[in-house]
Image (cartoon, helix red, strand yellow):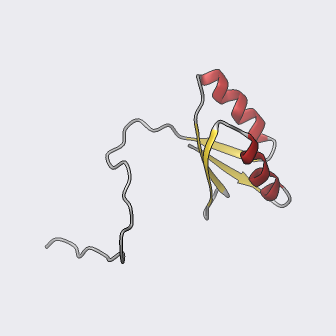
Amino acid sequence: MVRLSAQGRHLRQVAELVQELPEVLQCYRVTGDACYLLIVAAADMEHLERLLDRLSFYGQTNTSMVVSTPLDRRVVTGTVRETPPKT
């Protein structure tokens, strides 16, 4: 995962760039310190470094690697309700 903080005209440029990068599997526009959250795949660390170098032109990057997946995915099938805390 790569969080990217971009500003101004770079916001639109990033949205266009990720369409062309096969390493970017998913791209989310998010709130908070970063503007984008990218799910990426790289063959090795050198490949990841080249990708980060390319992205860093548009803003600051912050990278995290997934080490395990306790919950892979849930699908929303109806109304989402808050679960009451256990007492």
Query: At 67% across and 44% down in the image, what residue appears?
Result: 61
Whole-percent x and y of residue 26?
A: 59, 48
Please identify the quadrant where the N terminus is shown.
top right
Residue pictured at 80% horizontal, 58% vertical? 12
Quarter where residue 74 is shown:
bottom left
Instruction: Judge from the rendering whether residue 77 lies leftward or rightward of residue 54; answer left or right.
Output: left
Residue 69 place in picture, x, y as percent: 36, 42
Horizontal side of 83 relative to 86 (left or right) equals right
The number of discs equals: 0
Q: Where is residue 43 in the image (x, y as percent from the top left)?
A: 59, 24
Q: Quadrant of residue 44?
A: top right
In the visual, does 36 lie left or right of 80?
right
Q: Which quadrant, please, contains the C terminus?
A: bottom left
Question: Seen from this angle, which residue lies furthest left?
Answer: 87
Residue closest to the far right? 9
Image spot of residue 45 (x, y percent): 60, 23
Image height check: is 21 above or below 16? above
Residue beneath the point at 67% across and 37% down: 22
* As drawn, 69 above or below 53: below
Camera-side residue of 79 and 64: 79
In this image, 41 relative to 17: left or right? Answer: left
Q: Which residue is drawn at 38% across and 53% down?
A: 73
